Image (cartoon, rainbow, N blue to C red):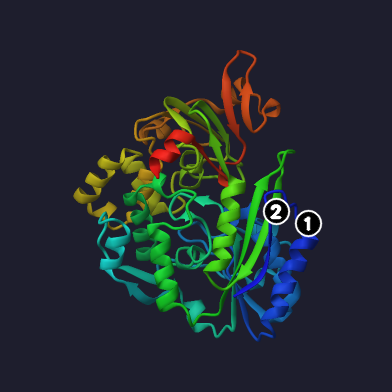
Amino acid sequence: MLYFERGSENDDMTPRDLQNGLNEALDKMGNKKKVLALPPDFTRYHSRAGEITAYLHQYYGDILTDILPALGTHSPMTDKEIDKMFPGVPRSLFRVHKWRTDIVTLGEVPAEFVSKVSENRVDYPWPAQVNKMLVEGGYDLIISPGQVVPHEVVGMANYNKNVFVGTGGSEGINKSHFLGAAYGMERMMGRAETPVRKVLNYASDNFASHLPIVYVLTVLGTGDDGKLKLRGLFVGDDQECYNKAAELSLKVNFTMLEKPLQKVLVYLDPDEFKSTWLGNKSIYRTRMAIADGGELIVLAPGLKQFGEDSEIDTLIRKYGYLTTPEILKLVDENEDLRNNLSAAAHLIHGSSENRFKVTYCPGHLSREEILSVNYSYEDLDAMKTKYNLHSLKNGFNLTSEGEEVFYISNPAQGLWSSRDRFETSN
């Protein structure tokens, strides 16, 4: 059922619009006795999910008994991050998702189904795992807020991904990431219907229909002033809610370019991007736009590690970012990668497939560390001087030296592709 919908490419919803829309949807759901919120973590700060969670607390009061940030494999939120993302919400409500231990398996998507939707690229069964709180907590409403935006693993972020991956377990996360990587990231990004989404939908329909989950989905786009605007809000408990949000997101967040780009410059907010696990959105979201032989320069002042998780960080340092065939071969030959397929998938996602150069300019990692994972290195301060961020606008820029640079201030908010590469990937 769709409880609320509003959205268009030019909409600019105010905080009051957001709260009123949410309250209208909650009114339609009737009285509740115990509510759980599943917002994303700080890596999705701009999703407005923190604001939505604060409105949920205002609406339900003590009935909102628990908030479980959907960490997936990310690090637990710090007190500082909670205070910034969820203003006014008592810290005592927050729980930590322990993705290796606090898990129940609702059912298993058959290997035959996974093989069919992946066009025989993988043939394993997929476990529908969620945090045990969803099943054992006695909630009569579970609210999952978040942003629908192009995504490298599932095609379009959020909806039931926030449940099965955000509060999922090690095996489910690993296998879903690897499914998307094996099928081909460029074949999926910006698409609502993908092999990973089909597997998640199978799990929702067959194993999770008894859970009282309602999705609060936002769509955000960058305005002419360079600031994020809330373009849409969709609240519902089924796929219609997601489909409407995904349709709007494709219009708002996808930039089609008539020709490939020779040089792309991306800035990573230091509060949001501390690892290449997250910072490689700069690669995921731009790779279809970059010309063969081109260069992606990533200004990453907050970069201090490769993986969000120590085990994954170790694997990234051990193998580095290589081409898809090379990583698939390493998976076959090495047990540590086979046992952590999300890391293997990430190494594929973070590769340029030797098509273009990736130059990282980190705030904390050394030249040796960057070179060891097969990226190029440049000094951050030197590159910030060469490319004056204060003078750049999102999109095409011409430097004082006559160099054309395509600038992106936040890669997490969009997807960019040249027309020929997008059409080829279909």
Disc assigned to residue 230: 2
Against 74, residue 107 (above or below) is below
Q: Residue farthest to the right?
A: 16
Q: Secondary structure at mark 2?
A: strand
As shown in the figure, which amino acid type bears the numbered disc 1? Thr
Left or right, 321 with reference to 217 = left
Q: Amino acid at mark 2?
A: Leu
Query: In the structure shown, which secondary structural element does the residue marked by tag 1 occupy?
Result: loop
Where is the C terminus found, in terms of image quarters?
Answer: top left
Q: How many other residues sit within 10 Å of disc 2, few (<14), some (14-19) or many (≥20)? A: many
Tell me, yes or no, if residue 309 can be seen here.
yes
Determine crowd level at label 1: few under 14, some 14-19, many 20+ residues with C-alpha closer than 10 A: few
Q: Position of residue 384 (x, y in %)?
A: 61, 26
Query: Viewer-proximal residue, 20 or 134?
Result: 20
Q: Position of residue 103 (x, y in %)?
A: 42, 73
Residue 185 in the image, given as x and y percentages of width and height: 40, 47
Where does the N terminus fall, quadrant-wise?
Answer: bottom right
Q: Nearer the viewer, residue 289 or 284?
A: 289
On the picture, is 224 further left or further right than 78? right
User: What is the C-alpha distance between the residues marked 2 and 1?
Assistant: 7 Å
User: Residue under circle 1?
Assistant: 14
- Residue at left 30%, top 63%? 114
Which quadrant would residue 385 be assigned to in this image? top right
Instruction: Please indicate whether residue 338 sits to the left or right of residue 247 in the image.
Output: left
Locate residue 140: give its quadrant.
Answer: bottom right
- Which residue sits at x=49%, y=45%? 275
